[in-house]
Amino acid sequence: MSNPSGDAGTASDGSASDGSMSDASTHSDGGSDAASQHDSAGGGDASACGPCPTGYSCGTANGIAVCRAASGIPRFSNVYLILMENTSLSTLSPAMANGTAPNLESLATTYATGSNYHGVTHPSLPNYIALTSGSTQGIACDCQASPTGSPCNTGTCILGACSCPAAAASIADQLEAASLTWMAFGEDMGTPCNITDSGNYAQRHVPFLYYTGIQGNSARCAAHVVDFTNFNVASPAAYNFIAPNLMDDMHNPDPTNSTNIPDGDTWIGPHVAAITSSAAYAQGALVVVVWDEDDGSGFPTADAPIPIFVMSPYAKHGGYVSATMANHYSLLATVEDGLGLTRIGMAAAATPLSDYFPAN
């Protein structure tokens, strides 16, 4: 990825310390906490930030007054996670350089990326579960969300012909406990809380369908897990999980051909532009476009770096490239620190993406 000269450079190893969070304050879909933080930019005193929650201190990021966690992560007004599929950084980087992925190349030169970010396992589903619960929850394959399907064993797991609902807490439970709003959007899902694959819709790319506390509560699931057509950039939730369909997330065709990357790039361009030009983003949001796992192009290397793009008014920009090793637990820790949530599972010991954010 490009790394032009200017206010950003390539990061070295040695990031920020762990920073478990205490209780979050309540804010609405529009991010009133961060709005108040933005009203007085440039100052580091408490009056500039407004009241910071317990465990946070008033500081600045890019000269903007903001409450910051002990880990250095700023307090975000809103978070948007866009999950793409099965692409190694070594596959995407040449495509950006040769003009096959112009929208992603533009994001790379405008915002921040990483050169050492990784999934936590293979195949897809356990990475999604890890990113939203701090653990793979023992899931080892792309199984089904159905609560009535056959349990997984070695044979059925390989075929994906089994079910693996997880009786585990997720970030959704944390958000609701903190009175923060959340939504999960699946492109081509159709009806809310749909656990049936159809066309380019894949249930395994919407992890919240797998948590028994969500799928077992029809009203809760229908209110939070919906088709992407319901996403409204003008009124986002505090936490927004976005799963494009199998064409738009670069998964299909499978096996891959020359259209996978252009299809995903074409989808990413206007949707990310709409978010980063919104009022909610300007108030202090975090937008992350990240892939679930590598594409195996480096076989026999099992854990090649995958792409990640980080965008926020508080983040480094201008083509900054982080070389610090990180993974989905690091990203979960970042989101939790940025929304005032206690870290769960493996995120508790993870180093968040602190080096993506300037010290002041």
Image (cartoon, grey):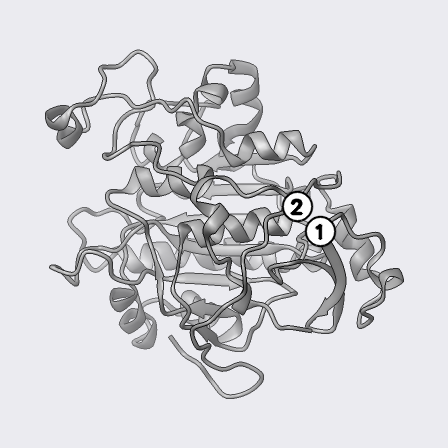
Q: What element carries label 2?
A: loop
Task: Point out residue 173 in the picture as x, y percentages from the top left corner.
Answer: 56, 29
Q: What element carries label 1?
A: loop
**Mark earlier in primary sequence (1, 2):** 1
Left-right relation of 17 to 23: left
**In the picture, residue 153 is in which quadrant?**
top left
Left-right relation of 137 to 58: left
Whether the residues at callouts 1 and 2 have beta carbons within 8 Å, the answer is: yes
Question: In this rendering, which labeled residue sits more in front, label 1 or label 2?
Answer: 1
**Can you tell which mark lies on residue 297?**
none
Viewer can see residue 96: yes
Task: Point out residue 340 in the picture as x, y percentages from the top left corner.
Answer: 66, 45
Viewer can see residue 202: no
Name the residue furthest right. 47
Q: Residue at x 85, y 66 (%)?
A: 45
Query: Which residue does the numbered mark 2 point to in the structure image?
Result: 340
- Give the class, few, some or many, for how many residues have Cα within 10 Å of label 2's Cα (few <14, many ≥20): many
Left-right relation of 121 to 16: left
- Which image quarter holds the C terminus? bottom right
- Work out whether residue 212 or residue 197 is closer to the camera in this orientation and state it: 212
Residue type at the position of mark 1: Gly
Residue type at the position of mark 2: Gly
Task: Point out residue 117 in the picture as x, y percentages from the top left corner.
Answer: 37, 61
Q: Residue at x 36, y 54 (%)?
A: 264
Query: Which residue does the numbered mark 1 point to in the structure image?
Result: 55
